[in-house]
Image: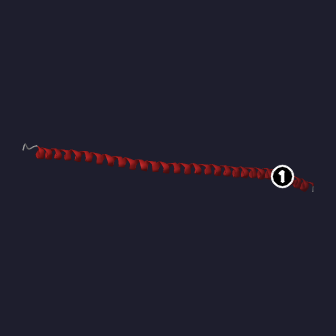
Amino acid sequence: MEGTERRTQKRRSEDASQCESCADLAERVLRLEQEREADMVLNKQALDALLEEVKAIRAQNETQLEIMTAWNSAKGFVKGMQLIGSVTKWIAGVVAAIGALWAVIHYGRGD
């Protein structure tokens, strides 16, 4: 009987030491789970901040696109006005030459 009691005591002491390890392990798992939850909250906050930054950048890009579109339209308008000015100067030169020729023909006769 003594051998059986010793084995039972030994088994109980092993079970007790394993339970302590299990309790430590369960505590460690719980702590890791809490840390994981905290990390997930921090990651979500970081992603939300990045999303807001991306939205701000997108809005800024849209504004810059509108400005560039307006600028290109203005440049096109200016080039159009320059073309009209050049054509007007050319037409004015031709009209002046025709007017001078007409004046010479009309008033240039020595009647």
Quadrant where the image shows the C terminus: top left
Q: Circle 1 — which element?
A: helix
Which sits in the foreground, 32 or 89? 89
Count how many numbered circles sit on residues in the image.
1
State left or right for residue 2 relative to residue 111.
right
Q: Residue at x 83, y 54 (%)?
A: 15
| Residue at the outermost left position | 111
Q: Residue at x 36, y 49 (%)?
A: 77
Which sits in the foreground, 8 or 70? 70
State left or right for residue 16 relative to residue 102.
right
Residue picked out by circle 1 = 14
Q: Residue at x 82, y 53 (%)?
A: 19
State left or right for residue 49 relative to residue 13.
left
The percent coordinates of residue 40 (x first, y second) are 67, 52
User: Which image quadrant is residue 86 in?
Assistant: top left
Which sits in the foreground, 12 or 95? 95
The answer to whether residue 110 is above or below residue 29 is above
The percent coordinates of residue 110 (x first, y second) are 7, 42
| Residue at the outermost front position | 111
State left or right for residue 11 relative to residue 85.
right
Q: Residue at x 86, y 51 (%)?
A: 13
Amino acid beneath label 1: Glu
- For disc 1, the neighbor class at 10 Å (few under 14, some 14 to 19, many from 20) is few
